């Protein structure tokens, strides 16, 4: 497949101000009539090249005159016309086949409903069109379909008219007043429940908010609608951004490749990010729904009003919108709180986001798919909806927020909209707007070095050095940055140059008793100092430091980097007990635990029996007993780093060692602190009716952690407690917490019984069945045979992305012990190939499971290579999977 490069961007030679589409919807054959008015945007008559995929062309006309077959060129994925005018109308009639479309891109069938998904390049499966984000048009859409089967016909914007037609069909006319690129187009047809609410924007405009879901599931959309209303209010309050539509619709789809899609005024969501009630959704699901509803809603400004010039700029909208949804979630957690309590509530969200970054993005940035947040090239854009573009992209926005401050950032965002509302722009345009504010606050400086974050791949490392001068009460902190070559950079000769980045580095100091110091820099004393590292190495000298300080580093994770600093365990214990920055406090405990776990991995590899640990047990004991910590924060602080985070730190990668070490340490902490866990379990009672509020959810998560630690430590009462909690549960969080504690630690018949009880009770609910599959996919002892048996279960289907993810992805990506054998790899390759026949986007996600194969030891390394090779040897691979595999094998 050809490689597309960022530098090859050319503006489209035409404007397309008006698009009229009319659909005769039918799952077998849908006929689309597109009427497109083109205006020349460049000198001379340029050929008109339109994209199309899996379409049957019925007719094409220019200015009403049908073209003969020799007047256009029809190729596999393009239709080329040669118009002879500056302004002309093209009429195209074509047919697509939703029923046969298992890719879930373009127009497709889900159950008895019809949906579209156009981002990034799905619109070309609906009609021939300039399928690129810099072509923005106003859309008028007519939808016709059987009225009984498809009583509801939705598209973007406003409903103008609805009427009945002969033969039991009906028709709806929609008009979207806002120009948009075609990737934001949407159609939905089917029978749905609808929950709605009339809202008012801050300027008093009425707006109808609607959530559509499968017939019978309308009882589960209360939370989604509430989240939508809060998103509306939050964007007005925090950024002054108001809804620009009379109605805003969310529709839940059972079959969906992504989480959700921000189509203008008609968001389509994976049902897993819409449907929730206390019996079927966990607290984590409630929070995830809030985040995704916020995310898609916030796109209405950051993505839709101002969109991307080309797909290399994807992070322009995604990084920014992820940052916005993270802030929304944090504000929701901190609602009604202030001071240290608010900081600790917000830190819970920050901890979760940083963990995600480390689990998903750091490995990507160290592997063969490493790319800057603004990639330089791609073969298939669908492969670049990555943790780097999204999560690291959000960190890059967050750093600008940190450098500018809340007010400065808001001013920069206002400037961005002043300059670019209604346009398709670039990441540079965004930084330009931010820089216009930055230079006012920092005379003589700019964001020139900062922009390298958009161009450079790899996770930078910042080494810290501390020199204390006891006589002068001064200390010097030196930061040194480097970023090793990653991905294809490793193959370059001479090696790629990686100039220093602009890194905001937040730092605090504690004395040896744990009290905060207020070091003085440039005459000002502060709790937290923000150092702006812009060179390979810089030193800052602090005054008024009465003793050699304990450094609290990278507070609130002020930059997406890895910190290197040698220090004794005792300093980490002190920070874990006293740091006033709740993120850095959590981080200190995590580092202590990581040290311990890596020592265990090493000992296991040598066949040694590692000595018992006291530092970690004592730290955990103190944290468990700390009454000042909120339950939600405590649950984070007392959790061990995830397997995948640890795996990243082993060299060569040692998946089985990591699993065993983590299991051993959990058993040790569970047993050594049994009385403390037991009392935490009993005191973390959330009383009364279920509510997903942060306090109750925090209690439940601490309680579930305590239960699983008691199970890990083989406490004699643990299984009884778990069974009681399982059968007595009044909500899914408690039920799932108990069931997973059982499944992950016990092989008793009672545990097996609980698992089948769960199935009996929830087999009618697809989202709960996903949890049932996922739990088994990741359970200890699950093998390829177990997974194959589950695939034969009548409830399993490879065609439904959620189901494929819950069983196959969970096993291949999250069951390290189960999958890291030759037969696990062969199974993975087989599933990538099977999925690729159905759905290349989903297949390409699975194909990335072993990106980092070259970092494993033998025999895994060779076995992984031959599994990858077996995929590459297939004759017919999608462009999606082919790109991933060829990069992995390079
Ligand atoms: N639907 C995806 C998202 O919102 C792609 N835009 O991030
Ligand atoms: Zn997005």
Image: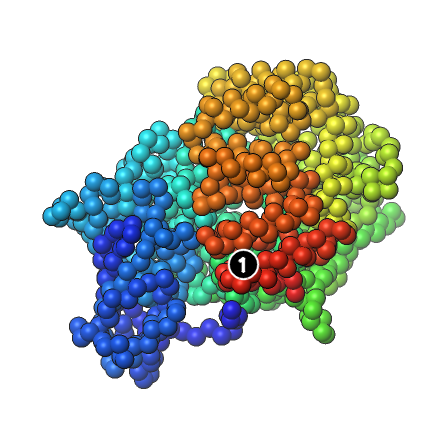
Q: Residue at x 72, y 55 (%)?
A: 862
Q: Of 512 and 162, which appears nearest the observer? A: 162
Which corner quadrant of the image does residue 790 belong to?
top right
Is 787 left or right of 467, judged from the image as shown? left
| 202 in relation to 711, above or below | below
SS at circle 1: helix
Is 461 left or right of 244, judged from the image as shown? right
Residue 626 in sight in this render:
no
Residue 240 position within the rendered picture, expressed as x and y whole percent measured from the top left: 40, 48
Q: Of 727 and 731, which appears nearest the observer? A: 727
Q: Residue furthest bottom?
A: 44
Residue 878 position within the rendered picture, expressed as x and y whole percent measured from the top left: 50, 60
Q: Residue at x 36, y 53 (%)?
A: 100
The C terminus is located in which quarter?
bottom right
Residue 193 in sight in this render:
yes
Which residue corresponds to mark 1? Answer: 881
Whether disc 1's CB lies below 8 Å from ligand 1 is answered no
Name the colouring of the figure: rainbow
Q: Of 15 and 825, which appears nearest the observer? A: 825
Q: Residue at x 49, y 74 (%)?
A: 8
Residue 270 position within the rendered picture, expressed as x and y whole percent measured from the top left: 42, 43
């Amino acid at each position: 497949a050809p490689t597309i490069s960022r530098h090859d961007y050319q503006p489209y030679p035409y404007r397309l101000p008006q698009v009229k589409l009319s659909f005769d919807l039918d799952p077998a054959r849908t006929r689309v009539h597109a009427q497109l008015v083109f205006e020349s945007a460049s000198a001379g008559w340029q050929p008109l090249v339109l994209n199309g995929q899996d379409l049957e062309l019925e007719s094409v006309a220019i200015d009403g005159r049908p073209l003969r077959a020799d007047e256009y060129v029809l190729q596999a994925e393009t239709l080329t016309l040669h118009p002879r005018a500056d302004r002309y109308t093209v009429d195209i009639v074509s047919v697509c086949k939703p029923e046969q479309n298992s890719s879930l891109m373009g127009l497709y069938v889900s159950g008895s409903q019809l949906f579209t998904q156009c981002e990034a390049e799905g619109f070309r499966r609906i009609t021939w069109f300039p399928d690129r984000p810099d072509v923005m048009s106003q859309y008028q859409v007519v939808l016709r379909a059987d009225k009984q089967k498809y009583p509801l016909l939705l598209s973007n914007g406003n409903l103008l008219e609805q009427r009945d037609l002969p033969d039991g069909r009906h028709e709806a006319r929609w008009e979207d007043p806002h120009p948009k690129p075609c990737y934001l187009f949407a159609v939905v047809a089917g029978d749905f429940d609808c929950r709605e609410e009339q809202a008012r924007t801050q300027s008093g405009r009425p707006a109808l908010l609607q959530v559509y879901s499968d017939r019978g599931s309308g009882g589960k959309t209360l939370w989604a609608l509430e989240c939508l209303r809060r998103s509306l209010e939050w964007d007005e309050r925090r950024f002054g951004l108001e809804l620009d539509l009379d109605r805003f619709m969310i529709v839940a789809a059972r079959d969906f490749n992504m989480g959700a899609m921000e189509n203008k005024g008609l968001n389509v969501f994976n049902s897993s990010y819409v449907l929730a009630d206390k019996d079927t959704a966990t607290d984590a699901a409630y929070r995830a729904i809030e985040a995704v509803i916020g995310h898609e809603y916030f796109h209405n400004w950051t993505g839709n009003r101002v969109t991307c010039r080309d797909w290399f700029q994807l992070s322009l909208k995604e990084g920014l919108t992820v940052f916005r949804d993270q802030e929304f979630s944090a504000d929701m957690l901190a609602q009604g709180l202030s001071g240290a309590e608010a900081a600790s509530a917000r830190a819970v969200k920050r901890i979760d986001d940083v963990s995600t970054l480390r689990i998903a993005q750091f490995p990507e940035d160290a592997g063969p798919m490493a790319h800057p947040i603004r990639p330089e090239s791609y073969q298939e854009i669908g492969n670049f909806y990555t943790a780097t573009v999204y999560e690291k992209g959000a960190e890059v926005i967050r750093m600008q927020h940190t450098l500018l401050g809340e007010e400065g950032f808001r001013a920069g965002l206002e400037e961005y909209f002043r300059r670019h509302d209604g346009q398709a722009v670039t990441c540079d345009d965004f930084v330009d707007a931010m820089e216009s504010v930055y230079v006012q606050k920092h005379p003589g400086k700019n964001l020139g070095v900062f922009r390298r974050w958009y161009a450079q791949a790899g996770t930078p490392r910042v080494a810290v050095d501390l020199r204390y001068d006891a006589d002068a009460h001064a200390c010097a902190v030196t930061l040194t940055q480097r970023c090793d070559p990653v991905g294809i950079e490793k193959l370059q000769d001479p090696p790629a140059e990686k100039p220093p980045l602009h890194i905001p580095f937040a730092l605090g100091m504690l004395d040896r008793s744990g009290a905060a110091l207020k070091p003085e820099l440039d005459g000002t004393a502060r709790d937290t100092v923000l150092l702006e590292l812009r060179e390979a190495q810089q030193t800052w000298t602090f005054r008024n430091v009465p003793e050699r300080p304990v450094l609290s580093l990278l507070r609130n994770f002020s930059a997406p980097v890895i910190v290197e600093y040698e220090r004794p365990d005792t300093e980490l214990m002190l920070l874990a007990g006293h740091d006033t920055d709740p993120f850095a406090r959590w981080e200190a405990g995590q580092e202590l635990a990581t040290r311990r776990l890596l020592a265990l991995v090493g000992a296991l590899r040598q066949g040694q029996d590692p000595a018992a640990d006291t530092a970690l047990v004592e730290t955990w004991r103190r944290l468990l007993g700390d009454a000042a910590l909120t339950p939600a924060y405590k649950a984070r602080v007392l959790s061990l780093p995830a397997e995948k985070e640890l795996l990243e730190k082993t060299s060569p990668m040692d998946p089985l060692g990591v699993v065993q070490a983590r299991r051993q340490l959990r058993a040790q902490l569970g047993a050594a602190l049994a009385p403390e866990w037991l009392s935490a379990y009993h005191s973390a009672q959330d009383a009364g009716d279920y509510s997903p509020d942060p306090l109750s959810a925090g209690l439940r998560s601490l309680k579930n952690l305590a239960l699983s630690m008691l199970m890990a430590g083989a406490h004699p009462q643990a299984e009884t407690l778990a069974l009681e909690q399982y059968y007595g549960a009044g909500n899914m969080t408690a039920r799932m917490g108990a069931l997973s504690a059982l499944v992950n630690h016990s092989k008793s018949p009672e545990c097996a019984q609980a698992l089948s009880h769960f199935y009996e009770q929830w087999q009618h609910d697809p989202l709960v069945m996903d949890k049932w599959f996922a739990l088994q996919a990741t359970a200890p002892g699950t093998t390829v045979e177990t997974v194959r048996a589950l695939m034969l279960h009548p409830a399993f289907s490879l065609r439904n992305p959620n189901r494929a993810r819950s069983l196959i992805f969970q096993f291949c990506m999250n069951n390290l012990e189960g999958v890291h054998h030759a037969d696990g790899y062969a199974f993975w390759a087989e599933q990538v190939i099977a999925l690729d026949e159905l759905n290349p986007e989903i297949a390409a996600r699975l194909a990335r499971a072993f990106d980092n194969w070259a970092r494993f030891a033998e025999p895994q390394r060779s076995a992984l290579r031959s599994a990858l090779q077996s995929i590459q040897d297939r004759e017919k691979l999608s462009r999606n999977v082919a790109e991933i595999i060829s990069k992995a094998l390079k």
